[in-house]
Amino acid sequence: MKIFVYVMMIIIFLYTAGFSITLWKEKSKVGSIVVFTLALVVVIAPFFTIIK
């Protein structure tokens, strides 16, 4: 189960970070920073909730 969580976490992070890069290229700097922060939360949050 932990492997599944790690794989999903990596997939979601890569997708969200990619969207953040797309926003950055479209000159939406604030939106890009917010989305990248969301990507970091996706990586950090499972360590406090799911993975113990």
Image: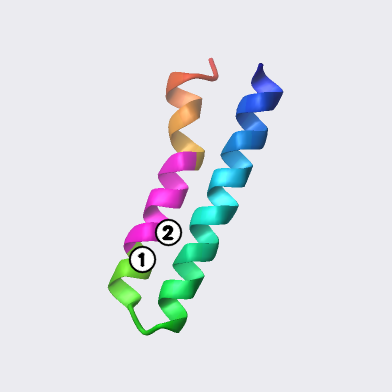
Could you tell me which secondary element the residue under label 1 belongs to? helix
Residue type pointed to by label 2: Phe
Report the quarter where the N terminus lies: top right
**Would you say 33 lies left or right of 47 here?**
left
Q: Is residue 25 above or below residue 4?
A: below
Majority secondary structure in the magenta region: helix
Name the residue that disc number 1 marks: 33
Outermost residue on the left side: it is 30
Tell me residue 9's x, y (percent).
57, 38
Q: Residues within 10 Å of mark 1 (few under 14, many from 20)?
A: some
In depth, the one of 28 and 51 nearer the eye is 28
Tell me residue 51's x, y (percent).
54, 19
**Would you say 40 lies left or right of 1 here?**
left
> Within the magenta stretch, is there residue 48?
no
Cα distance in 3D space between marks 1 and 2: 5 Å
Residue type pointed to by label 1: Ile
User: In the image, what residue occupies the spot 61% across and 35% down?
Assistant: 8
User: In the image, what residue occupies the spot 36% across and 84% down?
Assistant: 27
Q: Are marks 1 and 2 in contact (CB under 8 Å)?
A: yes
Q: Residues within 10 Å of mark 2 (few under 14, many from 20)?
A: some
Outermost residue on the right side: it is 3
Give the label on residue 36, or none.
2
User: In the image, what residue occupies the spot 52% across and 59% down?
Assistant: 17
Could you tell me which secondary element the residue under label 2 belongs to? helix
**Would you say 49 lies left or right of 12 here?**
left
**Would you say 12 lies left or right of 41 here?**
right
| Range of residues picked out in magenta | 34-42
> Within the magenta stretch, is there residue 37?
yes
Q: Is residue 29 above or below residue 46?
A: below
Give the label on residue 50, or none.
none
User: In the image, what residue occupies the spot 41% across and 73% down?
Assistant: 23
What count of labels does the image hold?
2
